Amino acid sequence: MPSLVNTEIEAAVKGFLIDQEKMTEVVERMTKEIKMGLAKDTHSRAVIKCFVSHVQDLPTGKERGKYLALDLGGSTFRVLLVNLLSESDVEIVSKSFNFPVTLMSGSGKALFDFLAECLSEFCHYHGLENESLPLGFTFSFPVQQQGLSKGILVAWTKGFSCEGVVGKNVVTLLQEAIDRRGDMKVNTVAILNDTVGTLMSCAYYHPNCRIGLIVGTGSNACYVEKTVNAECFEGYQTSPKPSMIINCEWGAFGDNGVLEFVRTTYDKIVDKVTPNPGKQTFEKCISGMYMGELVRLVVMDMVGRDLMFHGTTSERMQERWSFKSSYISDIESDAPGEYRSCNKVLSELGIVGCQEPDKEALRFICEAVSSRSAKLCACGLVTIINKMNINEVVIGIDGSVYRFHPKYHDMLQFHMKKLLKPSVKFELVVSEDGSGRGAALVAATAVQGKAKL
Ligand code: BGC
């Protein structure tokens, strides 16, 4: 079938198309950065920080008990109660709270007071106010952990910029907010990254799971490293435990300029309008927070050059961030030659009277952005697998992009296979309840660790 897409539009998205050679180059550069993050001598100037999570035990299935969990870091905020009853019976009750956008850039105190208020409402609703429950806090931002229950926020990401939190121990900030209320007996025993919760939760059912990946609002991965290689962990040479989960914080890859060869002019525009320009370069090429805006910018450029929508568009489409990343998943869900979801998206955006070539062009732009995301993610996973030097691995994955994009899983798998040695076998598995079961499992480790002392 002859392409309906104008050659000038094809030329405009060329920058998003990265070939095998470039992907191999990404893997090479990322390998170097990960090694820098792990090593004591180079850690301070490394961009991929490879933070030590202080989680050294994968689940055994023997963990029991009732735990609370908080989940902050994506587009929703949740409170959960997790009851690990037996190996096969885990009860989870949760509530999502509307997270006012104003809190994302307000004061840190307002943020943590809000978290404590939601937690209190949840505890009272479930009659838990008098129970002394341990809490696992899934806090999905770059945190330098000094223990399971101590973590200093290094920087905000994903549009957050609350004052007075960077440089502070977020566990203390949360616990103080809980204690200020004086209406519950909750004790924050562990802080964890969402990738770690995802890995732990997946490892509960898939013992071979060694990597946790998030492709949602943000993107990041963690993996199981040999403790002796986790040089930033004080006990890296003496610890009796052979493994340490490393929170890579790969979103920051490229912040030193090494990814310019896969970036486009559109990436640079998106970067400029974020609260953290120059930061999270890799994440801004991959994750759901930015993909939609990238598509919108390309479309607006094409409209400006009279190549789409007869040179005019709606007011809504002119607004920054109006093109949600979920639209990309919707548009790419239509079968070839069909435009049911596409029409719905266009009508939500107030764009009327589109012809088929416009819709084809829109799909083409979406595909360019989502396939670059999947290719870069594949590069990241391949880097980690090669670094681990293993021949078989399960990767636990969560996040809206991976879950809802119709082709993301297949693209990821396809490109990983092309980059990996043929002897390496891997499986990509959706990981359920990272911030529930995963957080409870980490909290269980913390409680058991204390009990032994
Ligand atoms: C954060 C990570 C997190 C990822 C996925 C990034 O912006 O820095 O800590 O794991 O988003 O939520």
Image (cartoon, helix red, strand yellow):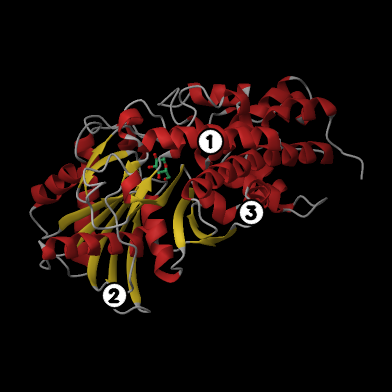
Name above or below for residue 309 compared with residue 61: above
Which residue sits at x=44%, y=32%? 252
Q: Quadrant of the C terminus?
A: bottom left
Closer to us: 178 or 316: 178
Badge 3 amino acid: Gln
Closer to us: 436 or 410: 410
Name above or below for residue 273 compared with residue 102: above
Badge 1 amino acid: Tyr
Provide the residue designation for mark 3: 413
Q: Residue furthest front?
A: 237
102 left or right of 345 in image: left
Closer to us: 407 or 77: 407
Which residue sits at x=67%, y=32%? 16
Which residue sits at x=48%, y=33%? 32
**Number of the label disc, if any, that sits on residue 290:** 1
Q: How many residues crowd mark 3 within 10 Å: few (<14), some (14–19), many (20+)?
A: some
Q: Residue furthest right?
A: 2
Q: In terms of sequence position, does the residue under pointer 1 or pointer 2 come before the other?
A: 2
Provide the residue designation for mark 2: 62
Badge 2 amino acid: Lys
**Number of the label disc, if any, that sits on residue 408:** none
The percent position of residue 384, horizontal first and vertical second, equals: 49, 46
Q: Quadrant of the N terminus?
A: top right
Which residue sits at x=65%, y=31%? 314
The percent position of residue 419, horizontal first and vertical second, equals: 64, 46
The percent position of residue 84, horizontal first and vertical second, equals: 29, 73
Q: Quadrant of ligand 1?
A: top left
